[in-house]
Image (cartoon, rainbow, N blue to C red):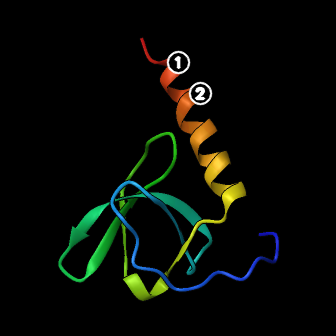
Amino acid sequence: MSGEVLEPCTPELGSYAVDTRDGRVGRVLGRVGPYVQLRPPGGGAEWDCAPDLLRPAPPGLVLRARVTEINREGRLP
């Protein structure tokens, strides 16, 4: 990561957040029980994370995630 300080967050549906346990960035899909569900940019397996372990994704990571998703959409039949 780039050394940016990431503050705790309560992410909104559709926003991007960073899982501080391992640095993964994901799009917020919703909540299941006490957890927030995230999906990696471009698709893949969803994962759960406690809200207190999430931070808002900084603009550079959001841009990278959006480019990944747009590139994936362009490859779909």
Q: Secondary structure at mark 2?
A: helix
Q: How many marks?
A: 2
- Seen from the viewer's position, the closer of residues 32 and 61 is 61
Residue 34 spot, x, y in % from top left: 23, 83
Which residue does the image show at 44% across and 42% down from the upper left?
43
- Seen from the viewer's position, the closer of residues 12 and 2 is 12
In the picture shown, does residue 10 fall above or below 72? below
The image quadrant of residue 31 is bottom left
Quadrant where the N terminus sits is bottom right
Q: Which residue type does callout 1 highlight?
A: Arg
- The residue at which mark 2 appears reads as 71
Which residue does the image show at 36% across and 65% down from the upper left?
12
Name the mark on residue 75. 1
C-beta proximity under 8 Å, tags 2 and 1? yes
* Left or right placement of residue 34 versus residue 37 in this view: left
Which residue does the image show at 29% across and 78% down from the upper left?
35
**How far apart are the alpha carbons under marks 2 and 1?**
7 Å
Outermost residue toward the top in this view? 77
Q: Which residue type does callout 2 highlight?
A: Asn
The image quadrant of residue 30 is bottom left
The image quadrant of residue 6 is bottom right
Residue 74 spot, x, y in % from top left: 53, 18
